[in-house]
Image (cartoon, rainbow, N blue to C red):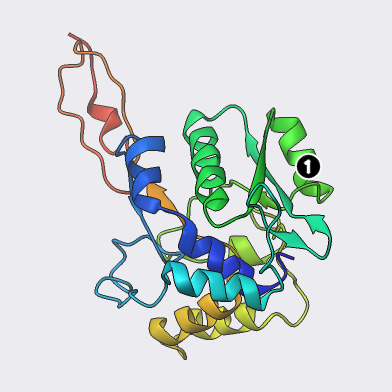
Amino acid sequence: MLANANVIKAINSAIDRDMIVNSAYQGHAVKTLTPFNPKWSAVEGLDTSSYIVNAEEIENLLSSAGLNEKNALGYRVSGNTAVNLKLVVNASNNFKKETANIIASQLSQIGLNVEVLTLDFNSYINALNNGQYDLYIGEIRLSDDQSLMPFFEKEGATVAYGIDQENNPIIQAYTQFFAGSMNVTDFMAQFNASMPFIPVCYRYGLIAYTRELNKELLSTQNDNFYNIEKWSFQ
């Protein structure tokens, strides 16, 4: 079912990123509708108004995927079988656990029943490796050039979970974009057409420190410990 791009588009539109940022991440994140950091110059000013559709269009997307019928509980059925999606999340991260619960609640509002499976890290990785999931909460830190190849390569950080490696047009499109032969607007049009994964937010880096430090702590977007060699205790 999730191989259908219309279902993924409906899920993407049903996710309230503001709630996730403000509740799950307690304001320590910034929402995004693209796979890139929204502060990246290439996407600043990009018109994303068409990336999210309204409730009526969500209904049309799900109906076009054959999910126009609901059971007595209000959940969608495929044929005679109730749709039950498994969403796996790593138990060691409270931000991600809360995100998973929020997403499950939001998807229930469009008739998709989601079971959140909170797993220890080893079980989480095993579930991903064995395909024992429909959705999963993941996180990756992109390099300064915002390369998405860790999503698309088997040897990448995400091991390309759930992303087809064979003749995938979005990978070809990204290769063109990265090479400078496609602009970001055209790339995002293709990204949204296939939706290989759903971008949600970028979280901020945090520093916890003792008042006994007598030097000003300086940090950058990519390095929370920028001037650590100057730190000292009173």
Q: Quadrant of the N terminus?
A: bottom right
Task: State the count of labels.
Answer: 1
Q: Is residue 59 above or below residue 108?
A: below
Q: Is residue 116 left or right of residue 220?
A: right
Q: Is residue 187 above or below residue 89?
A: below
Q: Quadrant of the C terminus?
A: top left
Q: Nearer the viewer, residue 208 or 217?
A: 208
**Judging from the image, what secondary structure is the residue with disc 1 in?**
helix
Q: Position of residue 217 (x, y in %)?
A: 20, 30
Q: Locate residue 171: give its quadrant.
A: bottom right
Question: Which residue bears the numbered disc 1?
Answer: 127
Measuring 72% from the left and 37% from the top, which residue is drawn there?
A: 124
Q: Position of residue 8 (x, y in %)?
A: 60, 66
- Three-letter code, disc 1: Ala
Measuring 15% from the left and 17% from the top, which residue is drawn there?
A: 214
Q: Residues within 10 Å of mark 1 (few under 14, many from 20)?
A: some
Q: Locate residue 227: give its quadrant.
A: top left
One can see residue 25 in this view? no
One can see residue 221 in this view? yes
Q: Residue furthest bottom?
A: 181
Q: Is residue 64 left or right of residue 229?
A: right
Measuring 51% from the left and 69% from the top, which residue is drawn there?
A: 58
Q: Position of residue 130 (x, y in %)?
A: 84, 48
Measuring 63% from the left and 54% from the top, which residue is drawn there?
A: 112
Q: Is residue 16 above or below residue 187?
A: above
Q: Position of residue 145 (x, y in %)?
A: 42, 66
Q: Nearer the viewer, residue 70 or 108?
A: 70
Q: Is residue 37 left or right of residue 122?
A: left
